Image (cartoon, coloured by chain):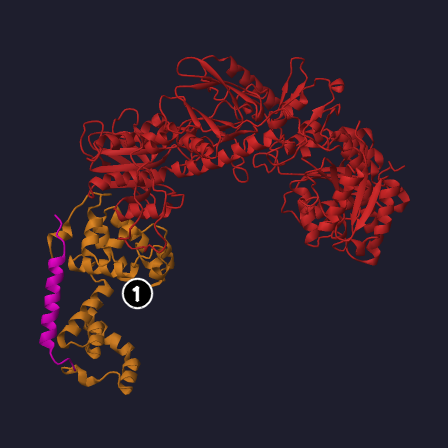
Amino acid sequence: MSDLNTRMIEKYRNDFLKEVEANVEEGEWVKMCMQCGVCSGSCPLGKHWAHPPQEIFMMIRAGKREEVLTSDSMWMCTSCYNCIVRCPRELPITHIMHGLATYSKKLGLVPKGQPTATFAEIFWNNMMKKGRVNELKLGLSLYFKDGFGQGIKNAMANQKLGMSMMKAKRMSPAEFFGGHGIKDVGGLQKMIKKAQELEEARMKKFD
Amino acid sequence: MSEEKKFAAYICTGCGIGDRLDAASLENVATREGRMNVVKQHEMLCSKEGVKMIQDDIDNDGVTHIVIAACSRRAKVDAFSFPESKVAVTRANLREGVIWARPDTDEARETTQEMAEDYIRMSCGEIKQMNPPKPSGQQERNPNILVVGGGVTGMTAALEAAAAGYTVHLVEKSGELGGHAAKLHKRVPFKAAPVGTPNSPDANLPMPEETGVPEMIQAVESNDNIKVYLNSRITKTSGAPGRFSVDISTESGDTVTENIGSIIQATGFTPWDPSVLSELHYSDSPDVITQLELEELANAAGDGPIKRPSDGKEVKAVVFVQDVGQNSDKEGELPYDSGVGDLVSIKQALYFKHHNGDCDTTIVYDNLRTPGAPGEDFYRSGQKNGVIFTKGDVKEVVPGDTLTVKMHDKILDEDAEIHADLVVLDVGMVPNSGPDPYAATESLEGMSDEEREAELEAQAEEAADETAVSVESILNLTYRQGTDLPQLKWGFTDSHFICFPYETRRTGIYAAGPVRRPMDIKQAMDDATGAAMKAIQEIELAAQGRANHPRTGDLSFPTFRREGCTQCKRCTVECPFGAIDEDEERYPQYNESRCRRCGTCMGACPVRVISFENYSVNTVGAQIKECLIPEEWDEKPRILVLACENDAYPALDQAAIAGQEISPWARVIPVRCLGSVSLSWVTDALNNGYDGIIMMGCKRGEDYQCHFVRGSTMANERMAKVGDTLESLNLEPERVVVHEVAITDIERAPALIKEMEETIEKVGLSPFKF
């Protein structure tokens, strides 16, 4: 959390665009959008988004910082890459969406209970423990994320799938106890920490 | 006539004509009925040998009048033109007009042969009425070009013409050359980014560049072939291409008279005044300015940051409002879009970015247009440098120390405000045209009688109102039809913007640059080059007494029989090109080099005294008369088709080429323009026993396709009176129809003839068959 998350900026000024350029992965492409709307029309989930990509880009340029960063739109991206393939200006739209999501997470502006964000968090924490994803625990954490009762319900509903996976040796109940991992977990964690520090240092401060 | 006439007909049997038709019988018709002195057949008349056979007859046998019975007059034009010999030539269209238009069946053979024989008869009749055209000698070669306007367009035209060896008189009303372009800080780039330039945000994209205007002025001033008249105006232009006499009132107050071959009008534009839009506060806020005013600020700033007019503060945020008063249906605003304002705003936003990358530059547009080769790359260049483009509708500018632009963001669909130090308005270009000679008459078109009366009254009132602003004449032509170039739309000087962009309705006077349509420097330079080419072409053709456009090279020109003329003035009024003046005795005075050879005067003349050497009331009249009308009990109707040679006739040719069947009853006569059709042809044809008459001309009205602009309209007006003729003859009105036919109507044109065939079946054959 930084003071960036509550930053107020004037509308239709370049400030937020510059912030996005500096701090969002591939953010320097946002200004090149020509508002044709092909991305919005190509998005298979487009109608479920509050703001399709074209609109997000316009909002960035209009300086609507809070609306953009607290939006759940970029979290809706399924990485189908339709927009990237079709964008006549060749903007890496999918990457920008993920970049925006990452930035909003970094600032702590993700809307509460956003499922994609929650899953991403569970996935990350799971992976960081052993250096490998423990699928049994990942599945269970996901089932029980909304409480014990709902967790049992979810588990029962997917019972058949779970059994089949075990039969096919795609998932082992033994994983529940510790589970497999990489040789040097400590080393990985140090590496990631260093990378995060570097990224943090590179993040441009705006006041 | 002192010269002896010798008539010859040549029948080609190539391209299947010999297989499908009985050539011996055709020869017989030409000899016996056509009374040709020489009749010959050739198996491939357009071949070297065939053409040589004809040329030998001209050279050795004294043949002066030639009928070529072969393909359409639109095919093998060069082979059958005989430019070195003074001969009259006509063509009987046996290939496209007969064999390709008819099915190759036993049942059709008889009617097909009849068709061919009729065309031979008709051509033989026509050629007897024709004379070899020769130049009038009204003017000699005059290599002087007058360029009116010393902006980028005028200077480019002058430099191009001078480089081709012509002498240019360049007249500029202000005290310096360069026009608006001389006041610019930079210009929109001329070239796109190199092919293969990536789309990335760090690509190397075109940027605003030096205007090049000072160099151009220098080149004009140092060119020996260009004479510049500053602070000068044209007080009188008389004559015609090749012999214009132009009075130039010069700086010193003297009037210089120059003999001029052709004229280029490059009078440019005036920026529209946005004062009427009170909500934008252009007139009462010094920090709301137009694009041209910003150029002055940029020039004043030199290499430093741009400062705003009110308090000299450095501009840190600027908003560009696009299309102010353009594309509007409101009174007093411009109904069109000037199209180049978006490129200009991108350029100007980059002025600010050049000094300060943090300067906020927002362009509020509705439809962003970036025409020209570098357009899209320049747009990207603006985006790359951080210019913000917002699709929106500006409602109001609130003046103050910080100006507030209130708008509706059309992408986000919400009202928004932008704060700025300076607001720049993109206003449209208003053409600097002279008064439109046809403004009064054209406003009457399509009105009812009462509306017409009211409009005339209003016009008279306006004319009487001395306080009304009148547009100053630019050329001061002494033409009967007004002092200046006619206008096309919205005050822009006439041109046929698709096919012949520089052609105006005044031959030898070419409009170029923003007076013709809104354009930027690059387009204006291209336009000026084109106009210079046309001006040169006109000088050379006028010198030979030949037409320039669209009947390029035509030597024939209209003359009239003075004894027969009733001085009704219809020809002088109806000529679409203002070619005909009146002499002191009020007889029409033809100016051959102003003429386009359409024959609209000929169609207008009620006493039929106007004719060309090779095209007259008699040449077509003879064709109508010579066609054999079968007896009523033969049950073979005859349909006369008068087809415009520019669109309808080639459409019928194309139809035949494409295998469309054309009615065997049709006899097609090409006319130069439907405007040249004389009412007497219709009357004669009906009296001769034709069962139906179809006139095929081009689209008329606002989106006209007529090569002669008004010919088709004129014909339609005249033919409205044909009903009386039919009534007096006790004939059904549906026997005479006028159609608009485009060159692409290859299925429709034969269908229209078929339609007439069905009409005749319904109403019966004409009772006038004797």
Say whether residue A48 is left or right of residue B710: left
Examine the rendered structure and indicate whether residue B119 appears above or below residue A165.
above
At x 73%, y 17%, the residue is B566
> Residue B320: x, y in percent?
30, 37
State the residue lying farthest toward the front: B60
Circle 1 packing at 10 Å, graded few (<14), some (14-19), many (20+), is some
> Residue A61: x, y in percent?
26, 47
Visible in this render: residue B691? no
Dominant SS in magenta: helix
Name which residue type carries label 1: Ser
Say whether residue A123 is left or right of residue B52: left
At x 40%, y 43%, the residue is B371
- In reply to whether residue A205 is colored magenta, the answer given is yes
Quadrant of res B722:
top right
Say whether residue B375 is left or right of residue A95: right
> Residue B583: x, y in percent?
65, 16
Examine the rendered structure and indicate whether residue B315 appears above or below residue A201.
above
Dot 1: chain letter? A
Q: Which chain is orange?
A: A
Residue occupied by mark 1: A79
At x 19%, y 43%, the residue is B358
Location of the C terminus of chain B by quadrant is top right
Examine the rendered structure and indicate whether residue B317 appears above or below residue A94.
above
At x 23%, y 58%, the residue is A100
Q: Which residue is more in the foreground, B549 or B458?
A: B549
Q: Which residue is more in the foreground, B506 or B394?
A: B506
Location of the N terminus of chain B by quadrant is top right
Q: Which chain is red?
A: B
Span of residues in magenta: A180-207
